[in-house]
Amino acid sequence: TKTELGYTSDIGDWEKRKWKPMPATFDAATHQITAKLPAARPLTFYFNALDKRGYTVSSEHISKD
């Protein structure tokens, strides 16, 4: 029911980074989630998908320097 990109340009301990959400798009035909990445570098991001039951699944984190 909802998809989003979570990202940070902070470095250091994971639990101390400030994570920001932004909208993402789900393509039902290809089962892919996409989003335009922020220009900030370094960048670490992941995707969240929420279903109608309220369950969330997340992708692995991806880092771009």
Image: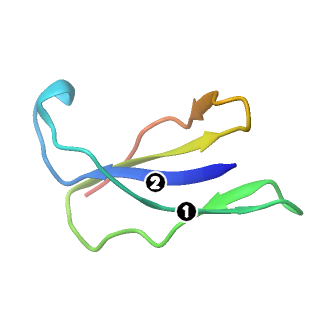
Mark 1 vs mark 2: which is more N-terminal?
2
Q: Amino acid at mark 2?
A: Leu
Residue 13 sits above or below residue 59 on the image: above
Q: Viewed as shown, does residue 1 lie left or right of 9?
A: right
Question: Which label sits on residue 15?
Answer: none
- Dots 1 and 2: beta carbons under 8 Å? yes
Q: Name which quarter of the figure residue 31 lies in.
A: bottom right
| Residue 15 drawn at (x, y percent) | 18, 25
**11 and 55: which is toward the camera:** 55
Q: Viewed as shown, does residue 3 lie left or right of 62?
A: right
Q: Name which quarter of the figure residue 34 lies in.
A: bottom right
**63 and 9: which is toward the camera:** 9
Please state, as top left, top right, bottom left or bottom right, where the C terminus lies in the image: bottom left
- Which residue is painted at 62% across and 43% down in the image? 49
Residue 19 sits above or below residue 25 on the image: above
User: Which residue is labeled 2 in the image?
Assistant: 5
| Residue 13 drawn at (x, y percent) | 13, 27
Residue 43 sits above or below residue 51 on the image: below
Q: Name which quarter of the figure residue 37 lies in.
A: bottom left
Q: Mark 1 and mark 2: span between their CA atoms?
A: 6 Å
* Callout 1: SS: loop
* Callout 2: SS: strand
User: Which residue is labeled 1 in the image?
Assistant: 24
Q: Residue furthest front?
A: 53
Q: Viewed as shown, does residue 57 lie left or right of 62?
A: right
Residue 20 sits above or below residue 18 on the image: below
- Which residue is painted at 84% across and 59% down in the image? 28
| Residue 27 drawn at (x, y percent) | 77, 64
Callout 1 environment at 10 Å: few (<14), some (14 to 19), or many (20+)? some
Count of numbered circles in the view: 2
Q: Amino acid at mark 1?
A: Ala
